[in-house]
Image: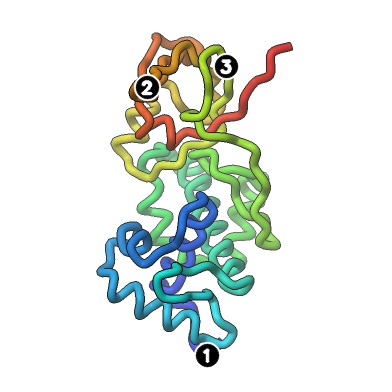
Amino acid sequence: MTEPLTQNIQDYLKAIYGLTSDGEEASTTALAARLGIAAPSVTGMLQKLAALQPPLVVYHKHQGAHLTPEGERAALEVLRHHRLLEAYLVESLGYSWDAVHEEACKLEHVISEEFETRIAAALGHPLRDPHGAPIPSADLVMPPTEDISLSGLHSGERAIVRRVRCEEAPLLRHLESLGLVPGAELDVLEVSPFDANLTVQVAGRNLTVIGPAISSQIFVEVVEET
């Protein structure tokens, strides 16, 4: 590669990976919204990343971008740092799960591979971060997951929350107040046919109604009735 992976480049690769792994298109508009950057600047960076040797992205105007194998490995390295750091901040330093994202974003670019290895060992090589997101392995393979969006469940189904796809601290605190955290068991009692609101019973909690803006951010494993 002709230049080092700067923090800016790493942020772009992580954003592209996040969009495409969620099944979305990594368009200029989507990347600009996720990164808080003007669309023309995004276009320029995508062209730059595509021109590197080896290229980190494949980019065609009006068709969005996707990562090359080299770009994906670089993105997974940053994600591994980020998610291990979040786990370390919660488990070893007493941070709450709503206060770790910004700290991890600052540190993910600067820790050494030795520090990463020591964090993983100290935590017992965790498989998921505090929000339930899978942590890429040391050889940069993303573990497969079979969780599905809570918004896709039907009345009468039971599930266990596996991960929350959310970075905003106020929403994370709200979900915690409802008991909608990784490991929580819930029953879907009713699905509104008009607005897709779910009435759910979280174990040990009162009934709560959540809309699709929230249910689409929660991923669960359905519990099969025996």
Residue at image mark 3: 157
Front position in the image: 72 or 96? 72
| Mark 2 Cα shell of 10 Å, populated few (<14), some (14-19), many (≥20) | some
Q: Mark 1 points at which residue?
A: 2
Q: Residue at x 40, y 37 (%)?
A: 96
- 119 or 137: nearer the viewer: 137
Viewer-nearest of discs 1 and 2: 2
Circle 2 residue? 197
User: Label 1's element?
Assistant: loop
Q: Do the residues labelled 1 and 2 touch (CB within 8 Å)?
A: no
Residue at the extreme bottom = 2
Q: In the structure shown, which secondary structural element does the residue marked by tag 2 occupy? A: loop
Q: Residue 183 versus residue 190: which sits nearer the camera?
A: 190
Lower position in the chain sequence, tag 3 or tag 2 = 3
Q: Decide: is 124 above or below 194.
A: below
Q: What residue type is labelled 3?
A: Glu
Q: Residue at x 52, y 30 (%)?
A: 182
Q: Quadrant of residue 156?
A: top right
